[in-house]
Image: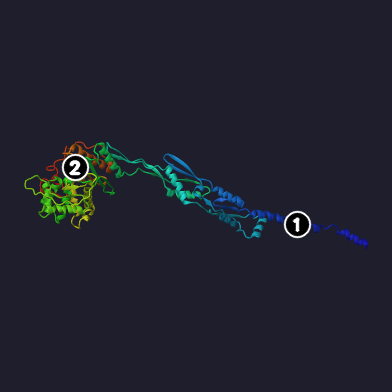
Amino acid sequence: MGASLNARRRRAGFPFLLTFSILLAVSAIGLLVYYLVTFSRREQELPAGVTVAGINVGQLSERNAVARWERAYAEPILLVYSNDLGDHPIQLHPDQVGWRISSEPMLAGALASGQEGGGFWRRFLDFLLGIELSVSEDIPLVADYQDNALEAFLRDVAARYDDRPGSATFDLETLTIYPGGSGYALDVAAAMPAVDAALRSASKRYVELPVNPHGRQELRLDTLRALIINYLDSRGFIYDGQGTVASVYIIDLVSGDEIDILGDVAYSAASTIKMPIIIEYLRLLNREPTAGEAWLMVNSLLCSNNSSSNLIMEIIGGNDIFAGLRRVTATLQSISASNTYISAPFYLGVEGQQLGSIQAPATTPNQSFSTEPDPFNQTTAADMGTIFSLIYDCAHYNSGLALALPEGQITQQECRRMLEVTSANDLERLLQGGIPPEARISHKNGWIFDTVGDAGIVYSPNGRHYVISVFLWERTEFQDYEKLWPLVEEISRAAWNFFNPENALLQPRANLPVTAVECAGNYLPPNPESVNLDDINAWKRN
């Protein structure tokens, strides 16, 4: 029995199976722990394939991923300002515009994308089976900056690199105006979204700034004003002097812009007042003028015949010339020519003429300059320019004078006839002497011993019609045709060249008459029957 027990003990031996089982269990636990630790470390990395704001951060730790995109978006933006002078590179560092990235929500989004494969143990099982989790997802950028700081930066770039168009210049010899050179300007409004896109891109951090070329500046009437003043100075005629005064009033009938050089200074109106007299005469007529009435009008306007003008005012006043004077002056006041009036008949120097005057209206001309105007017959350059402007609008648009007076008192046809008649005022001097001989001008002139004036409408071939009114005064005892008249003509030429640069008169017109061409026998119809108010020169073709 003892031998049998010993034998059993020998047969039992070392517990290999148990030991092996224990070792397997320990190894399995060890491997599980190892893979759990390894997997846990992998769980701290972002999944493969995930991008944040366009940057691949797959399999990076949270810290490294954040560092990568913050570093990428901290890189400067290259802005390029290009013009004919070359390319000008400018760096914009994001922090200059208050650039800030909100990394927390971006990181949270990236981490959440890695949990789409299921719970922890499901992902752990995939890890053990070698199934690699890969996502295809881009987490959008979450960032902001200060719009006003970016706009200020771009405006500073514009201030440094923009090239403004050059100022217009003029030539006193040719009386022409030249536009300034072209320039460039940064379009800040268009640049803002382009720079915004570059700030929000990790790869396209380059912006070709939108730079617009500026063409030459449009010629402005201010330059013509400077040219006229400089021209007068160069000829020794001080426009705002004590013994000399010049007034120029010009209206661009296309744009409505105007020049006013002492346009409110009072002058002796002389025969320019005959234009308002005809306005009142036509206002009185409510029918087609007779041949005799038409003859009176053209004789007054074209030949400046004082007798005809006095007779018209007498007719206007119902055989009372002083009532006629009141009507003419009242109408001038009502159409905003408030510094223009006539208070006495034209002096004829004949025996038996009824002399006298009415009270002149209260006027408010510029008191800083005195041209010693006729106390019975005054106007200003601005008033005469306004009168022609009103007639032009009435003739072409049935507005202007037709609206300034009570309805129906002046018709569009009557305004057209006034301009038609005065287009035959071919004295070939003053305003007409400063434009090409074939150009159309409807104007009325007048002068006395110390004053010369001319006002009218110039019809430019290119459609840029304009009103021009020029009055000059010099303290003297006689009218100096050789001095004052060429000044009016050169002012007229400067205006013509401004409005008609493609057909400029580079030199004064040659072969002008010494003084005005006589009206009778040249441009006055020979008799009442030959007067055609709708075609004033028809008699020449018959």
Considering every residue shown, the one lying at the far bottom of the view is: 1
Residue 182 appears anywhere in the view: yes
Residue 193 appears anywhere in the view: no
Q: Quadrant of residue 409?
A: bottom left
Residue in the picture at 71% in, 56% down: 33
Please state the horizontal and vertical placement of residue 466, each as a whole percent of the image. Answer: 25, 46
Q: Which colour style is shown?
A: rainbow
Camera-side residue of 457 and 364: 364
Residue type at mark 2: give it.
Val
Residue underneath mark 1: 26
Camera-side residue of 293 and 306: 306
Please state the horizontal and vertical placement of residue 453, each as a whole percent of the image. Answer: 19, 43
Up/down of 17 relative to 346, above or below: below
Taking the image as shown, residue 268 lies to the left or right of residue 159, namely left
Name which of mark 2 and mark 1 comes first in the sequence. Answer: 1
Query: Secondary structure beneath disc 1?
Result: helix
Query: Secondary structure beneath disc 2?
Result: strand
- Looking at the image, how many numbered discs can be counted on the residues? 2
Taking the image as shown, residue 123 lies to the left or right of residue 333, namely right
**Mark 2 Cα-neighbour bin, 10 Å: few <14, some 14–19, many ≥20:** many
Label 2, label 1: how far apart the Cα atoms are: 125 Å
Please state the horizontal and vertical placement of residue 484, each as a whole percent of the image. Answer: 20, 39
Residue type at mark 1: give it.
Val
Taking the image as shown, residue 83 lies to the left or right of residue 10, namely left
Residue underneath mark 2: 452
